[in-house]
Amino acid sequence: MTTTGNERFPPAGVDLSRPSVARIYDYFLGGDANWEIDRQFADKLLHEFPILRPIARSNRLFLHRLVRYLTKQGIRQFVDLGSGVPTMGHAHEVAEQVAPGQVRVAYVDHEPVAVAHSRSLLRQYGDEDRHTAIHADLRDPAGLWEKIAETGVIDLDEPVGLLMIAVLHIQQLPAPGSPASEDLGPQLVRTYRDLIAPGSYLGISHVTGEGIPPESLAMLNRIKTMYAESGSPVIWRTAREIRELFGDFRMVEPGLVWTPQWHPDEATITDETPHLDDAKQSIVLAGAARKE
């Protein structure tokens, strides 16, 4: 991996004392919005579990297929929570292939690198009247929603595609100083379900330790320990727990499935299929549901 100017000039607020989940994921996908501390951590994981790269790519390609599908269903606004750094095709780039000039996207992340790079790319290759990147905390739905509204890019009274891709298995702990220690994920998703307008869709992908090969479970146990030691605890949910995140929304067929199995018909000829011998090796369940 070649280094970039990021090594010398990290955006304000970047913590380089420990690896970042978003920047590690960027490295897995072949991006360059990462630092030495991220690459060292990621390389330790890849040395033990080289399958992590195809797993990350499979998840990213699910996002691509989901955006294509929802755009074809008439969705013209997307809110991407925990959007990460701009690697391997962002939502607006995919949507443009289906509905050129029509789709608005708000990218939201708490990682300064993700926001800084997204803003830079949007200035160069996006449309700042239709695309925006927001620095906000997923754990503050009201504040986050207010920041989206203030941009004027998204009309929150109209349907949106709410994307929560590979973000909810990063444990959503209460803010520092809070006496509580439970994971806030389900409560937060419930709040966001209430915020979006009828006709909206919710898309989720989430790591699970259920129903996967034994070697994959051993890998997840190792990863969980390593992430906890790095200060970024993770949580794996069962298929039932992930399904419950959609509440009473109507699930889109084929329901909650492994990432390679969700609407493979939406893949394009440029989508290189990751090498996974079995869909269960993706370790990530994915689905979408509509708010009636």
Image (tube, helix red, strand yellow):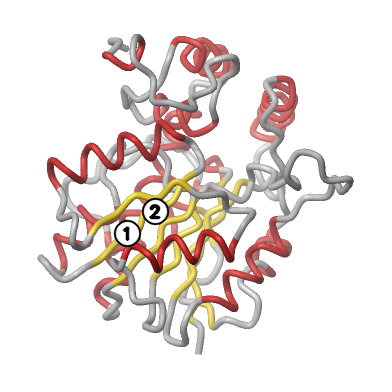
State the CA–CA distance, disc 1 to disc 2: 5 Å
When asked about the image quadrant of residue 162, the answer is bottom left
Query: Foreground residue, 153 or 104?
Result: 153
What's the residue type where badge 1 is placed? Arg
Which residue is denoted by mark 2 in the rendering?
62
How packed is label 2: few (under 14 Cα within 10 Å), some, or many (20 or more)?
many
Total marks in image: 2
SS for callout 1: helix
Against 194, residue 154 (above or below) is above
Residue 218 drawn at (x, y percent): 72, 28
When asked about the image quadrant of residue 158, the answer is bottom left
What's the residue type where badge 2 is placed? Phe
Going by the picture, which residue comes out furthest to the right? 179
Residue 171 drawn at (x, y percent): 69, 44
SS for callout 2: helix
When asked about the image quadrant of residue 177, the answer is top right
Against 3, residue 258 (above or below) is below
CB contact under 8 Å: marks 1 and 2 = yes
Residue 96 drawn at (x, y percent): 16, 61
Q: Which residue shows up at 26% across the image and 74% down it?
A: 76
Task: Give residue 65's mark.
Answer: 1
Against 106, residue 9 (above or below) is above
Q: Which residue shows up at 45% across the image and 46% down it?
A: 135
Residue 246 drawn at (x, y percent): 61, 72
Going by the picture, which residue comes out furthest to the front? 150
Report whether 76 appears left or right of 55. Answer: left
Q: Which residue shows up at 50% across the image and 75% down it?
A: 289
Report whether 287 appears left or right of 27. Answer: right
How packed is label 1: few (under 14 Cα within 10 Å), some, or many (20 or more)?
many
- Quarter containing the N terminus: top left
Task: Give residue 101's mark.
Answer: none
Q: Which residue shows up at 40% across the image and 37% down it?
A: 114
